[in-house]
Image (cartoon, coloured by chain):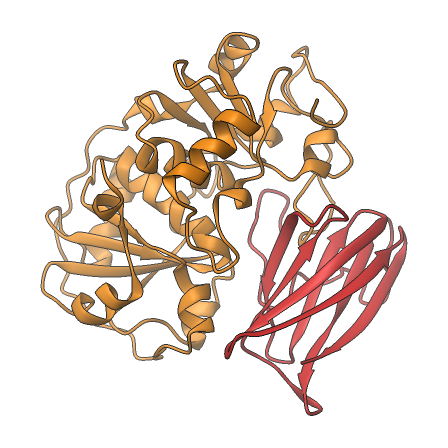
Chain colours: A orange, B red
Amino acid sequence: MSRSDVLVDAEWVEAHGGDPGVVLVEVDEDTSAYDKGHIRNAVKIDWKTDLQDPVRRDFVDKAGFEALLSERGIANDDTVILYGGNNNWFAAYAYWYFRLYGHNNVKLLDGGRKKWELESRELVTEVPQRARTSYHAQEQDQSIRAFRDEVVAAIGNDNLVDVRSPDEFAGRLLAPAHLPQEQAQRGGHVPTAKNVPWSKAADEDGTFKSDEALRALYGDEAGLDFSKDTIAYCRIGERSAHTWFVLHELLGQPNVKNYDGSWTEYGSLVGVPIELGDAK
Amino acid sequence: MTADGCGAPAGGAPVSAATDAGAQAVVQGKVTRDGSAVAVGYARLLNSGGDFVAEVPLGEDGGFRFFAAPGSWTLRVLAPGNVRAERVVSADTGKITELEVAV
């Protein structure tokens, strides 16, 4: 897999964003950002109300994903270009969903909304009208989703990557620093996990670092063994979807899973091992 | 803001009791240019080692807010036109640290 299979740049979006068979989708952390201005022809997916089950702690199921994409006018053979704020954090999360439900023709706009805005490119408020489709999703691809028992089994055996900030990893903070520290679970990390904050994979403009720099970051610096399977986690599985994208889609690592239960689940489990303190 | 969410609105999530930081170590402020709010741009929080910790888009009023841990932080502002500005700030539990960043 090469970068051009999974990433497009702003010039490509300006040239092809309105082409038939191409659908731009904004997925933002700040879900009101789209309403204030978005890339021409882009539709919106709300990471929370559209992608999460409203009652259980889980995703929308297959039927829910089909209903969402059909309603947004996205067809099975469309090329979906996702972008969003904060280094594509939520766009990468949505990317993982699309792949989970078998939509393989999906890419990220490198740099996302931030780079686009900082370059003063066009944003419009006009909402595109797309005809309804009959989208058919595949069963969830469990090869890219990890559950809690797999995480416990991976301790000391496979790569565990904790992609939260060093303060969250050490147990000093329970949530990212731009959010209130209101969680009630235990702090710390899964024993033997390496701490590679997700944001290290991106440059300041939100674009992904080069393959060489990424390999050095996860391999030489963090000590991941690329011959082993890998599970990435964060607090609720979104930042780790960004790292999953880096390891699985950019670096082509074969067995990488995102643990979407992440620290909010693990840090509330009874009896599992927890380690405190900074990365060694 | 709900317990399971990672989403923060532009400008940062609200402090629940407007003027009371409670157990939080809040760093907040505004970005201005010639006295007017800079509404398009990003505020980034870096730790004392210079590593990125969090980022929010600026609010309509140029505002930003972070819930940090006590200690020293660097706030970096990015705005269109290659605008960059940096301030070192210290956060304390139970306090709201205010700063205005003119670019």
The quadrant holding residue A101 is: top left
> Which quadrant of the structure image shows residue A123?
bottom left
Is residue A49 something one can see in this rendering?
no
Residue beneath the point at 44% across and 20% down: A230
* Percent coordinates x, y for residue A99 in the rendering: 27, 37
The residue drawn where x is 22% and y is 35% is: A1
Q: Position of residue A27 (x, y in %)?
A: 39, 56
Image-based side of A200 in relation to A16, left or right: right
In the rendering, at what x and y percent does residue A11 appear? 26, 68
Residue B31 percent coordinates (x, y):
68, 77
Q: Is residue A81 at least partly visible in the picture?
A: yes
Q: Is residue A223 left or right of residue A230?
A: right
Identify which residue is drawn at 13% across, 64% down.
A131
Which residue appears at 47% of the width and 60% of the height?
Answer: A85
In the rendered image, the vertical position of residue A146 relative to residue B42, given as above or below = above
Residue A179 versus residue A237 in the image, above or below: below
Q: Does A167 sit above or below residue A160?
A: below
Q: How many marks?
A: 0
Pick the quarter of the image with the C terminus of chain A: top right
- Toward the viewer: B17 or A181? A181
